[in-house]
Image (cartoon, helix red, strand yellow):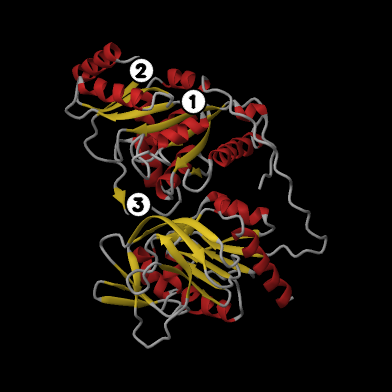
Amino acid sequence: MEDVPITPADCRCARLCISAVSGGGGKTLLSLGLAGALRAAGREIVPFKKGPDYIDAAWLSLAAGRPARNLDPYFLPPEELRRNFLLGVARTRRRLPPETPLLALLEGNRGLYDGLDTQGSCSTAGLARTLGCPVVISLNCTKMTRTAAALLSGLQHFEPETPIAGVILSQTASARHESILRRAIEEYTDLTVFGALPRLTDNPLPERHMGLASLAGSTLTPETAQTLQKLTELVREHVDTDRLLEAAAAAPALPQPPAVAAPPSPDADAVRPRIGYVRDAALWFYYEENLEALEQAGAELVRLSLLDTQDWPPIDGLYLGGGFPEDWIEQLSASPHVRRRLPALAAAGLPIYAECGGFMILTQGLRKGERRWPLAGLLPVDVEFHARPQGLGYVDGIVRGKTPYFPEGARLRGHEFHYSRCALPPEEFPAPELALHLERGTGMGPLYPRQDGFCHGAIWASYCHLFAPAVPDWAPGFVAAARTFARNKA
């Protein structure tokens, strides 16, 4: 749903895509440092993350100073990817003085040509071509000299239409090492070397679950700020940002998408329901587009926490996103919101939509090691936490039966990243009917193979994370359920 017009100036926005030869190639470190360095130089950054990712996107949001949007070819076709990209640019431009220079900065995922199959479907390279976005390769040069030129030449010629603008070397051991690399690349390729980052003794961004560790949810803590400042200084000292901006400005204008018809105006007496969403250190995985979709469908959003003791304001619906509840399990198990407020709201018929970590909160309890912590008790299962992933990747499923959020037979595309799975609770419960049959994905685990989506009354709880632009029925369905609840309680 389009809430601002996309103009020719938006279609001409300068842009860069940061990619690498493989995952772990330094893309996030470089993207964060670039965002900080260019911000410090007066450039407004419009951040984007390729693929289904919350953690790297949260870091990029903090570095850029505004929420990152996700661009994923698995969820959207090329024309809708361009529209979502341009909407991010347009919304940013409308909040700034007209002549403010923008740079759209896209962080890729995995290697440049890695996709879902041998044809490279849904790859970063394909997305860069869709967006006409110049690609900068972050190349780890550990124990490498002339081979760097061979790798870059291969990337250039593998799919020649991919707009590779140049490279930033990383993990260079010395000035001599950098000099040899530069000379080899200049001799054997026509790519620009935009800079060279020296070898770092410590990784400032340790790995965690599905991406980089976050220090306190999506909040800028002193530790986070210090890390981002170090990366900013690293890039400012070792990268030619002026030449990078020249490459970004050379990106071709994108075709202006056709305008989307505005939705019908609500009746003057239409209720605007208040949907609470929990965003704290335990639950903070939300696509920015999902929150926007709820607002555009007519909801007022209210930010909440499960980890404090403050009273919640009246709400007409509740959105529980993903996160790391296992890291906060003692506090969550003792939380009055979890143990008393959530059961009371559910008993009153409040529409509750929960994904992954939010689903875990609604279960009977969480098992971790030899211990078990009781939780909200709204679903007839426990969950057990494991050291290895229990579900990882894209999801494709069909909705079975009637739900408050989706029509029967709807196809849902999403993703899952979870280290827990369903376990039997200590008491006997009837076997639940799950509402989402998976053609792709793991879902609830061995107890319920190829199944996901507890749907009980006004509760939907699943491991599957949805991306609202790819599931257009979700936000209107959720808001309609919340509006009905608001009218019934009035």
Distance from Cα at disc 2 to Cα at disc 1? 25 Å
* Residue 462 higher or lower than 210, as above or below: below
The residue mark sitting in front, 3 or 2, is 2
Element carrying mark 2? loop
Element carrying mark 1? loop
Task: Give the amino acid type for the residue marked by disc 3 in the picture.
Answer: Met
Classify residue 163 by image quadrant. top left
Distance from Cα at disc 3 to Cα at disc 2? 32 Å
* Residue 154 higher or lower than 461, as above or below: above
Graded by Cα atoms within 10 Å as few (under 14), some (14 to 19) or many (20 or more), the crowding at tag 1 reads few
Task: Give the amino acid type for the residue marked by disc 2 in the picture.
Answer: Leu
Which residue, as the protein is rendered here, is positioned at the far left?
Answer: 143
Q: Residue 127, position in %: x, y? A: 46, 36
Q: Residue at left 37%, top 29%?
A: 233
Res. 210 mark: 3
Q: Residue at left 29%, top 48%?
A: 207
The residue mark sitting in front, 3 or 1, is 3
Q: Residue 31, position in %: x, y? A: 40, 34
Q: Residue 336, position in %: x, y? A: 48, 76
Q: Are the residues tagged 3 and 2 within 8 Å (C-beta)?
A: no
Graded by Cα atoms within 10 Å as few (under 14), some (14 to 19) or many (20 or more), the crowding at tag 3 reads some
Res. 191 mark: 2
* Residue 70 higher or lower than 186, as above or below: below
Camera-side residue: 230 or 469? 469
Res. 335 mark: none
Graded by Cα atoms within 10 Å as few (under 14), some (14 to 19) or many (20 or more), the crowding at tag 2 reads some
Element carrying mark 3? loop
Residue wearing tag 1: 41
Task: Give the amino acid type for the residue marked by disc 1 in the picture.
Answer: Ala
Camera-side residue: 312 or 118? 118
Camera-side residue: 136 or 469? 469
